[in-house]
Image (spheres, grey):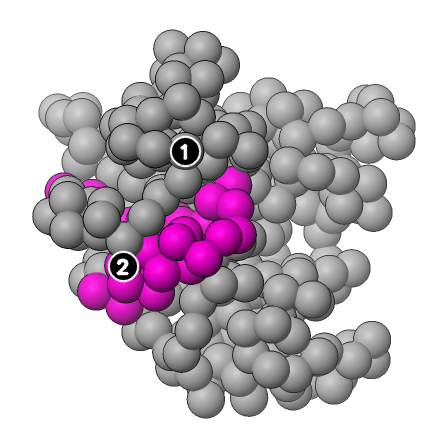
Amino acid sequence: MSKFVSKKILKKVLIERKEDAFKGQNGKVLIIGGSIEYIGSPALAALAALKFADIVEIFAPEKAALAMNSFSPDIITKKFSGNYFEKKHVKEILKKTENFDVVLIGNGLGRNKKTKEFVNALIPKIKIPKVIDADAIKMLEGKTENSLFLPHIMEFKEQFRAKPSMNLNERISLTRKKAKEFNTTILLKGKTDVISNGKKTLLNKTGHQRMAVIGTGDVLAGIVSGFAAKNSLFDSACAGAFVAGLLGEKAFEEKGQYFTAMDLINSIPEVMKALER
């Protein structure tokens, strides 16, 4: 029988910051995402990741990146030519990934032929840990090591060629099987999240049904990536799912059915301070 994630996971993933710590020592996150059509997704992920890591930078097509800069002075972007990522951007990005601890890719990329070529040329060559979300899940072909996928049911079906059952035990079995087969870690999102790396499997039951609203998945991806800058992908997935779910529960208590993704981000400090007591 699989166990549930608990508050204990935070003791493993939260960084004890030293008095003489310098900027970047406590995690550097790179987010690759955005397009002329989708601007908010990478920004939400970045703002969430910044609550846990020292440095978060977004690589995005130039117009999207400029728009993201207007959201908050905390957002740092590197701008790439064009309205979408293309294969021509791969070489430059690969060189720069070495300066980060983890890469989150997929949020707001869009789905077109040239971006699909970009995704499949870039992801297998990235050496550092990878958190793969949203459009990157849908476009990536084949296996990739040192990675964590964050799919909902339909994205799981597209990437792993199998549709999860609504029966929880069957979902657990399938997630574990595919994580082992693809040599990866999977956080299958749902009423009960299933997290597995093929060897270890845990469940998460925090959350609220309103978290199906747009943007909350990007917040989850940002939190997971913030943790993954200094922790294993499996532990980061467990902690991220647990914390994001608690944020959703708190947002519902305060705002009812009317909360948005930004409400989750804004409540991170209060929720984390309560958890640390």
Residue at 70 percent of width and 38 percent of height: 214
Task: Give the left or right position of residue 50, taking residue 187 as reference.
Answer: left
Is 198 placed above or below 44 here? below
Task: Give the left or right position of residue 54, taking residue 245 as reference.
Answer: left
Residue at 82 percent of width and 41 percent of height: 210
Kindly state the secondary structure of the residue where label 2 is placed.
Answer: helix
Task: Give the left or right position of residue 98, taking residue 186 as reference.
Answer: left
Residue 155 point in image, percent of width and height: 62, 65
Residue at 75 percent of width and 84 percent of height: 169
C-alpha gap between disc 2 and disc 1:
18 Å
Residue 170 point in image, percent of width and height: 74, 86
Instruction: Please say whether residue 11 is visible from this viewpoint.
Output: no
Residue annotated with mark 1 = 83
Residue annotated with mark 2 = 122
Which one is in front, 236 or 75? 75
123 in the magenta segment: yes
Q: Magenta region: which residues?
A: 99-125
183 in the magenta segment: no
* Kind of residue at disc 2: Leu
**Which label number is shown at residue 25?**
none
Residue at 17 percent of width and 36 percent of height: 25
Kindly state the secondary structure of the residue where label 1 is placed.
Answer: loop
* Kind of residue at disc 1: Asn
